[in-house]
Image (cartoon, rainbow, N blue to C red):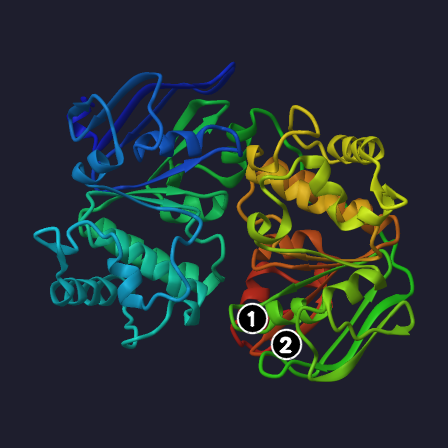
Amino acid sequence: MVSSEFALDLRAIEKRYGPVHALSGANLRVAPGEVHGLIGQNGAGKSTLMKILSGLEPADGGEIVIAGETVAALTPSEMLKRGIGIVYQDRMTVATFTVEEALFYATPGATRNGITINRRLLREKARTIIRRYFRTEFRDGALIGELTTAEQQIIQITRTLLSDPKILILDEPTAALAAREVDNLFEAIRAMRDAGITVIYISHYLREIRDICDRITVLRNGRDVATLRASETSVAAMTELMIGNDVGRLFPDRHDSTGEPFFNSIGLAHRQAFANVDLTVRRGEIVGITGLIGSGIKEFTRVLFGLERAAAGTMTLAGKPYRPKSPRDALEAGVALVPEDRRAQGIGLSLSLTDNIVLASLERFNLYGLMQPRRAAIRARHFISALAIKAPDETVPAATLSGGNQQKVSLAKWLCRDATLYVLDEPSVGIDVAAKAEIYRTLRDLADQGHALIVVSSDLDEIQGLSDRIVVFHRGHVALDAPASKTTTAGLLAVAAGAPTDRHP
């Protein structure tokens, strides 16, 4: 193939940050009208390559060819001019904006003569895009904060499509979506491809990559190591290419180490999200909880940690009544929550690793009201080593770490406190397979040590592979409570979607 046969041809791209080579001759060649997957571990160079492509970072070497034409310097305005649109993983919308405001704010071509917004034209164009690709509509005046995660994703993609991109880059588009919503997004992506839009799809979910992409490029250590046809590869093969060696089985062995009941709820209810939830978690047990968006699992997590109050029912912890009115009550009772959004709620990006790790246990590192920095640093170094957190030392800001290592820091904060019940909300969202394996081993070690764990996740492979027992919510009620060994991912999805449990164990 000559370069004119590619919609995008990135050749031997180099990027250095001081002595660190983020990219060492990376290539990415994307054919017109295909869905092209881009995969690699955190730190493999995916984000750096996209920053260069979006004009946010200059390349130190290599060549960028778009539709057969070499581009000397790619800036954000030049990116738009060349027909490249990017939808980032973090939803870049304002909760108090209306749908219309979110769509048209700073949208290229949104003004007449650079002064007034051509609302009528853009409103009709947005409606056409949303109907065509997503088969839905939004009511006039709806606020972004009132929409579901999937609906917010539609708005963000539509906003990018308003500029008529020839190449659309989707960065972890399904990270916060449930299985049915992923299927809907895939239908939209296929429709975009059929309309002639070239799609670059970045994700850590390798099964999705295989299902939606035509071809796949694998990055490792700043280089492309393979370009594959999705129909001719497997998740196992992609995993081996990403890490360069056999990571071993992703999920650790289950051990029969469960003890007496530790947490118990009877008839627990939320004012609107769930009702009559009976749940028991034993010492040494990992209980996986899953369900579709709106099933009540997120609100159940918030009630467990005192972020919301139960409307009815009872809870006990270690044989004592447990009814937290606030997160402080939960902490004092020995409950820890590792939140889904690590960057907004799990860690302080500007804080050092030491400060992050001891943040939930500050009272243990002060003497007469004064912090003991040496003791805190020693403790931080212990968890950096134990969790294999890749960082120069404990003094660097958390913002400098990859997503997987940030998630480990979020977990280390609660390990440092030595909780007795760990509640983990989407513990592996947006992180690579090697980091997942390390976190799963850590969670299994906690269970083997006698801790009780609740893992809330929309990743059915994760729930089925990690848990000892699985609870499925459907429309606010427990639809299934069964040993993981008696379930399948297909069965779990069917139950979550409302199928009878006697047909789908």
Q: Which residue, given by chain and number where applicable, does mark 2 sit on?
A: 479
Distance from disc 2 to disc 1, alpha carbons, whole Å, reads 7 Å
Q: Which residue, given by chain and number where applicable, does mark 1 sit on?
A: 496
The quarter of the displayed image where residue 302 is located: bottom right
Contact? badges 2 and 1 (CB < 8 Å)? yes
Identity of the residue drawn at 56% across and 52% down: 344
Q: Nearer the viewer, residue 449 or 323?
A: 323
The quarter of the displayed image where residue 303 is located: bottom right
Instruction: Tell me the amino acid under the disc marked 2.
Output: Ala
Identity of the residue drawn at 90% across and 73% down: 320
Instruction: Tell me the amino acid under the disc marked 1.
Output: Ala
Residue 322 lies, in percent from the top left, at 83, 73
State the SS at label 1.
helix
Q: Which of 386 and 463 is in front in this view?
A: 386
State the SS at label 2.
strand
The quarter of the displayed image where residue 308 is located: bottom right
Q: Nearer the viewer, residue 311 or 220?
A: 311
